[in-house]
Image (cartoon, helix red, strand yellow):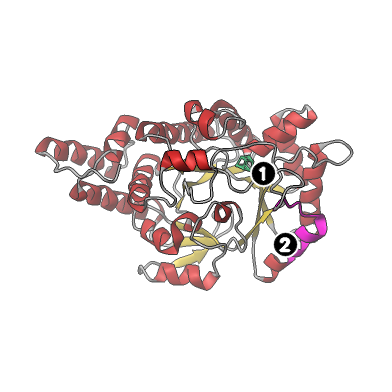
């Protein structure tokens, strides 16, 4: 995408102007319009797209850049699945496999509280042996209860749609049963991970054992209906093509439109692009993609198009400093993003894939990055309330 640079014709410029004007007037642009923007290669047009995304960010959410003080806890990397981009998973009993006990998890949560964290983000591998009294749900509820009993002030942002499906499948429950039980135990919101690309042709290659697109959408929509907010993600920059990226954005938009029109008590809070990092990923996909680190230019154009296409529905857009590095994430703040994410304190999944962004950031680092582009910062909660 980024290697071919063309000189735009007058008609190209007219088409782009019309699309960007429509967006700046507050109107929606179509998926076809988004695809037109996403396939531009002329630097002056790309700059026009960037400037429009930046302007829309200003109009839709203002100039303050937010961040959250949080800690990532991956309770196990033992996983029944074999996603072709995943360098995190292990089989039980093999080198590097881990499974934290409650004491270890509480020690990590205590460290987070000592650093003023407001959120624990908890996800893990799909470990069939993780059960209490023969039930997966009881194991997950025990994790939640242990943290919430000891640190009731922490917001638990936990368990992806794939984990919800795993628990439901293991125990013969409905998705609704699982979400309600997690919610009642103290889970506050659901990470919108495992979305990868919501296109089953892509999923059959990169995550063939994962839930299909329709199931991901069903679980996220069920969460919204039950009052559990979710985030949303796109794993970009591997084998997918721009049409599939735009179709993914369109599906996120429709999920949010449904939550709005049916007045569900919760919605998608933010959108995050997760650029593919191939360095330590399993060899077949790494070879097929042919590069180890994300292409920043492609990521930035997609970031801008996502703001222009989704901003009327999902106002908060966050770059991944883990994947892009803090410098790349800082640049994305001028391409439509308004949030710098969390301190994380301990990131495993992407770091094990070979990402060079690091495993944690201090609050001072996040604040300094935001100030370096002359924007103000503000700490937020998981649900985007200012703290
Ligand atoms: S991405 Fe998640 S589900 Fe897929 S193999 Fe890795 S840990 Fe398992």
Task: Describe the element under mark 1 as helix, strand or loop.
Answer: loop
**Residue picked out by circle 2:** 109
Is ligand 1 less than 8 Å from the beta carbon at label 1? Answer: no
Q: Residues within 10 Å of mark 2 (few under 14, many from 20)?
A: many
Q: Of all residues shown, which one is farthest toward the right?
A: 133
Task: Report the span colored magenta.
Answer: 96-110
> In the rendered image of this protein, does residue 12 appear above or below residue 172?
below
Residue 384 as seen in the image, left or right of residue 275: right
Front-most of 78 and 218?
78
> Residue 95's spot in the image, x, y percent?
71, 52
User: Which comes before the other along the chain, label 1 or label 2?
Assistant: 2
**Residue picked out by circle 1:** 159
Q: Residue at x 89, y 38 (%)?
A: 133
Residue 118 seen in render: yes
Q: Residue at x 73, y 29 (%)?
A: 169
- Which image quarter is the N terminus in? top left
Determine the CA span between mark 1 and mark 2. 16 Å
> Residue 371's spot in the image, x, y percent?
40, 71
The secondary structure that dominates the magenta segment is helix
Q: Residue at x 44, y 34 (%)?
A: 248
Task: Describe the element under mark 2 as helix, strand or loop.
Answer: helix
- Which image quarter is the C terminus in? bottom right
Q: Residue 85 in magenta?
A: no
Quarter of the rendered structure image containing ligand 1: top right
> Residue 41's spot in the image, x, y percent?
23, 44
Front-most of 55 and 205?
205
> Residue 7's spot in the image, x, y percent?
14, 43
């Amino acid at each position: 995408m980024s290697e071919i640079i063309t000189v735009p014709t007058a008609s190209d410029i007219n088409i782009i102007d019309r699309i960007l004007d429509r967006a700046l007037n507050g109107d929606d642009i179509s998926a076809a319009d988004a695809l037109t923007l996403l396939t531009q290669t002329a630097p002056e047009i790309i700059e026009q797209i960037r400037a429009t995304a930046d302007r829309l960010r200003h109009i839709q959410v203002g100039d303050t850049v937010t961040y959250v003080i949080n800690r990532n806890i991956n309770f196990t990397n033992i996983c029944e699945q074999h996603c072709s981009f995943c360098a995190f998973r292990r089989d039980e009993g093999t080198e590097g496999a881990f499974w934290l006990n409650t004491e270890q998890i509480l020690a990590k949560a205590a460290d987070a509280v000592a650093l003023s964290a407001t959120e624990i983000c908890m996800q893990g591998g799909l470990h069939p042996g993780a059960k209490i009294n023969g039930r997966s749900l009881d194991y997950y509820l025990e994790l939640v209860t242990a943290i919430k009993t000891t640190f009731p002030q922490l917001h638990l942002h936990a368990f992806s749609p794939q984990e919800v499906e795993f628990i439901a499948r293991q125990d013969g429950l409905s998705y609704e049963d699982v979400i309600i039980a997690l919610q009642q135990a103290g889970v506050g919101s659901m990470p919108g991970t495992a979305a990868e690309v919501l296109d089953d042709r892509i999923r059959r290659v990169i995550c063939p054992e994962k839930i299909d697109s329709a199931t991901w959408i069903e679980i996220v929509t069920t969460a919204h209906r039950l009052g559990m907010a979710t985030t949303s993600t796109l794993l970009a920059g591997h084998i997918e093509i721009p049409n599939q990226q735009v179709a993914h954005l369109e599906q996120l938009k429709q999920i949010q439109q449904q939550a709005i029109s049916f007045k569900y008590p919760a919605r998608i809070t933010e959108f995050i692009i997760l650029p593919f990092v191939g360095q330590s990923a399993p060899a077949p996909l790494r070879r097929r993609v042919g590069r180890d680190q994300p292409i920043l230019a492609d990521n930035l154009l997609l970031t801008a198009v996502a703001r222009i296409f989704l901003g009327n529905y999902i106002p908060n857009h966050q770059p991944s400093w883990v994947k892009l590095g803090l410098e790349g994430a800082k640049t994305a703040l001028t391409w439509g993003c308004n949030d710098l994410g969390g301190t994380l304190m301990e990131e495993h999944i992407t770091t094990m894939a070979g990402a060079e962004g690091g495993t944690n950031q201090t609050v001072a680092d996040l604040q300094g990055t935001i100030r370096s582009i002359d924007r103000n910062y503000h700490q937020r909660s998981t649900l985007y309330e200012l703290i």
